[in-house]
């Protein structure tokens, strides 16, 4: 039995007076006494770590469960109790099959990977008789998708992108950035919106109509979660070739004489790249349009109305 376990047992027992009894050991408070290994004591837990402890004052028992055993035995599941009056340990619900492995191996290192090739993995538990359980969920050597990206228009000739690295992306070494032209319809060109909204001095964007094909801007992965793109936003760009996405709007809802949106609009997305050179899937796209305000609330106050909304997460708004 380890001295560490014996000392812990003594300290916990001394801190809880309910553990004391007439036939228990007498000891002055705030003193250290070596209580283990006890003379003629039975089997006790192996030296271990990362276990949990508790005390049952009614049963006068110190409880140790879980953790890792040094030198074998069941891992993460053994439960022992200690009677501090007799210093005897009892193994509860013993289970010797399958034999334990130190530190309960839950990791595996594969050194046979090839650059640019995605490997898929599953894990199965196996008992002492060779019976296997169901396969785990599949894992693969591909970065997770970047989920949080924002575009900030710094000027009519510069767009700055920022994003949050994907969770658990310790193997991510860089990112690729992609851009696509976007065709928008102004509120003045959409009859339902123009009827509900008084005309503005300069038409605002009312709806996306088409998104063109995405083109990669980076020759090699950029390391940090930030990218600046020099692009002319002063005039709209036509979409060449078939669009990657299109919204079909009924002709009766379009006003061909409506004033168009005057600025060019682009969509950006990023892909994470890991140390194997494997790329992740595309992130959601971010537009060079201000994000719509969220969580809008209204409160009537006599003849007035108070409005409150959440600040947009998009950077660069004035």
Image (cartoon, rainbow, N blue to C red):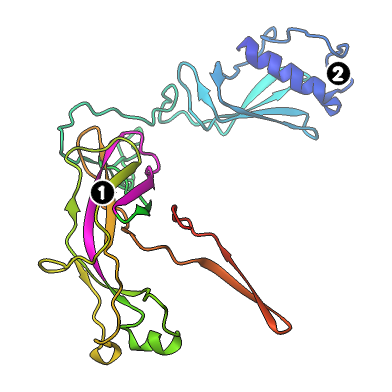
The percent position of residue 240, horizontal first and vertical second, equals 11, 66
Foreground mark, 1 or 2, reads 1
Closer to the camera in the image, 65 or 256: 256
> Compared with residue 18, is residue 149 higher up or lower down, i.e. above or below?
below
- Per the image, the residue denoted by label 1 is 230
The verdict on residue 172 being magenta is yes
Question: Residue drawn 55% across and 21% down?
Answer: 49
| Count of numbered circles on the image | 2
Q: 242 left or right of 171?
A: left
Question: Residue drawn 34% across and 44% down?
Answer: 133
> Compared with residue 47, is residue 34 higher up or lower down, i.e. above or below?
above
The percent position of residue 25, horizontal first and vertical second, equals 83, 14
> Compared with residue 286, is residue 82 higher up or lower down, i.e. above or below?
above
**Considering the image in quadrants, where does the N terminus appear?**
top right
Closer to the camera in the image, 161 or 25: 161
- Per the image, the residue denoted by label 2 is 23
Classified by dominant secondary structure, the portion drawn in magenta counts as: strand
The verdict on residue 26 being magenta is no
**Residue farthest to the left?**
241
Q: Earlier in the sequence, mark 1 or mark 2?
A: 2
The percent position of residue 284, horizontal first and vertical second, equals 32, 57
Q: Residues within 10 Å of mark 2 (few under 14, many from 20)?
A: few
Q: Report helix, strand or loop for mark 2.
A: loop
Q: Report helix, strand or loop for mark 1.
A: strand
Q: Quadrant of residue 101?
A: top left
Q: Which residues are magenta?
A: 157-183
The percent position of residue 260, horizontal first and vertical second, equals 28, 77
Closer to the camera in the image, 162 or 136: 162
Question: Residue drawn 44% across and 87% down?
Answer: 196
Closer to the camera in the image, 44 or 187: 187
Q: Which mark is residue 275?
A: none
**C-alpha span from label 1 to label 2:** 84 Å
């Amino acid at each position: 039995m380890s001295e560490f376990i014996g000392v812990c047992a003594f300290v916990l027992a001394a801190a809880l007076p309910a553990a004391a009894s007439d036939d228990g050991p007498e000891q002055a408070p705030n003193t250290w006494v070596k209580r283990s290994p006890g003379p003629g004591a039975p089997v006790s837990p192996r030296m271990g770590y990362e276990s949990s402890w508790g005390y049952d004052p009614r049963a006068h028992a110190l409880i140790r469960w879980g953790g890792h055993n040094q030198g074998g035995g069941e891992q993460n599941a053994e439960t022992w109790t200690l009677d501090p009056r007799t210093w005897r340990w009892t193994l509860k619900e013993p289970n010797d099959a399958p034999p334990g492995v130190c530190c309960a191996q839950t990791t595996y290192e594969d050194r046979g990977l090839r650059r640019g090739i995605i490997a898929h993995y599953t894990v199965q538990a196996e008992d002492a008789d060779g019976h296997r359980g169901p396969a785990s969920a599949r894992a693969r050597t591909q970065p997770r998708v970047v989920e949080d990206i924002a575009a900030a228009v710094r000027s009519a000739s510069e767009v700055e992108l920022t994003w949050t690295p994907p969770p658990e992306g310790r193997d991510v070494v860089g990112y690729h950035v992609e851009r696509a032209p976007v065709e928008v319809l102004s509120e003045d060109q959409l009859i339902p919106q123009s009827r509900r909204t008084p005309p503005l001095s300069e038409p605002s964007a009312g709806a996306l109509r088409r998104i063109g094909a995405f083109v990669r801007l980076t020759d090699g992965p950029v390391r940090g979660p930030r990218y600046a793109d020099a692009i002319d936003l002063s005039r709209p760009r036509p979409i060449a070739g078939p669009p990657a996405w299109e919204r079909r709007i009924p002709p009766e809802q379009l006003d061909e004489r409506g004033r168009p949106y005057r600025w060019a609009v682009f969509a950006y997305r990023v892909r994470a790249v890991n140390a194997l050179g494997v790329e992740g899937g595309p992130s959601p796209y971010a537009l060079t349009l201000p994000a719509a305000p969220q969580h809008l609330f209204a409160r009537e106050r006599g003849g007035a109305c108070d409005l409150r909304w959440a600040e947009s997460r998009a950077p660069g708004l004035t």
